[in-house]
Amino acid sequence: MAVTTSTTTAVELSPLPPLANSSGHNRFHNEVANDSQNPSSEDILEASRLADSAVPDGGYGWVVLGGCAVIAWWFVGTGYSWGVMQGALVEKGLSTPATLSYVGSLATAIIAFLAIVNARIIRAIGAQKTGMLGILILGISEILSGFTINSLPGLFITSGVTLGVGLSLCFMAASATPAQYFSKKRGLANGIVFAAGGLGGAIISLSMDALIRRLGTAWAYRILGLVTLLTGLPAAWLVRERSPVKNAGFIEWRLFRDLEFVIIFATGAVATFPLLVPAFFIPLYARSIGLSSSTGAGLLAGFNLSSAAGRILCGFLCDKIGSLNALSISLLINAITMLALWPASTTLAPLIAFVVLNGAANGGFFSTIPTVVGNVFGSQRVSVAMAMVVTGWGGGYLMGSPIAGYLLDAYGGSESGFQAYRPAITYAGCMGLGAAGLATFVRFRKNRTILAKV
């Protein structure tokens, strides 16, 4: 009989002699069957190499990349423009920055909480339907938010939970599909997709600020939802998988026996605590140093534009110097700018410098992580491994910005000047430095040569 593993190799076994112990005979056949259904990590990596050797590095992949980029425009841009809406809601007296930051954090945290479930969904219905479902929920949640702007519980449901479900489905469709079409240009492909998200954040931030000032927060939300549906649904329809993976497992627990996976998992878990702090608090911080709300929205737009540039640059660096090198560099710059530059930004010029540098490093994290996972663990299980890694981001996404908000309240609140922000900034910077240390550790564990492409 022939037993075939997940690779193309078949192993011929000679006929078995009769066994006196039939239970032992059955146990042997069960073990063989289990081995064929649960290939080893080496088998999966070999299958990934074989699959990657046939990757077109282009072709219809560019169409898929365009569709994923539009999806990323909305799910990244919407999450990263929450600071504008948060500032408007604080100004109208709905609640405090700490409480309102929970709304934006909850939406983003659901990306992590549902990552493994969504990996199952994308395997069941495909990337196209997953993306279209995500955009549909995203647009509807924004339209519904227009009717709940005077209710904090209502915003938690519409702009928190419902929006988060849409974001999470869109994230999985946009992050798992490009790896099937690109191998040598995988880092650049991921960079382009997530750069579109940064660009979306910039445009949405400026547009939302203008709409809020002209039409009010309710209509700003409704218009955002309608435009999301009109542009996002056709883009999601273009996203097709090249070779759907049929593995039915929710979690590949044996990955936790791999120290590299554990450290990468921990890196993401720590890094997400500070990542949303600048995006959520830049508009409020700008007001604390005497700048207008429109200037704050402009700074947030600049942050998102820099994030877009950083995503492309780090995606390019992944292909040139290695994904782990690019990840370590982006996290280190993110930490240094928060610890050294943001506390010194008491006027517009240094704050612009912080926005540009931190935004670029911040965006680099999101474009390098999918490439790191795909390169280290293989494209054949990138959706499962990526889902597991993203699940670890839940705590940081949910609590990272609210912790900064509580520190701000504890030291006087948003009306007490820029000094009140210093403890929150220090907390974010230290968490960023810890993440950079973890990424650097796994990089040098893999290869101790300083100039090696890792």
Image (cartoon, rainbow, N blue to C red):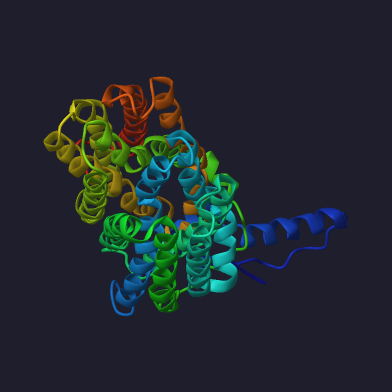
Q: How many numbered callouts? A: 0
Relative placement, left or right, of 200 versus 142 is: left
Q: Is residue 221 above or below residue 133?
A: above
Residue at x-position 24% and y-position 47%: 303
Q: Write down the quadrant of residue 233 in the picture.
A: bottom left
Q: Is residue 388 visible?
A: no
Q: 131 or 19: nearer the eye?
A: 131
Give the camera-side residue of 151 and 111.
151
Query: Residue 261: x and y, percent?
Result: 46, 42
Outermost residue, top direction? Answer: 411
Residue 46 x %, y %: 44, 60
Could you tell me which residue is drawn at 45 percent across and 27 percent down?
406
Image-quadrant location for residue 92: top left
In the rendered image, the vertical position of residue 22 relative to residue 401, given as above or below: below
> Quadrant location of the C terminus?
top left
The answer to which of 356 and 216 lies nearer the viewer is 216
| Residue closer to the observer: 265 or 148 | 148
Which residue shows up at 71% across the image and 68% down it?
A: 15
Residue 148 shows in this picture: yes
Residue 200 as seen in the image, left or right of residue 35? left
- In the image, residue 328 lies at what x, y percent? 28, 39
What percent of the width, then of the height, locates residue 60?
A: 33, 79
| Placement of 159 over or under 361, stated as above or below | below
The quarter in which the N terminus is drawn is bottom right
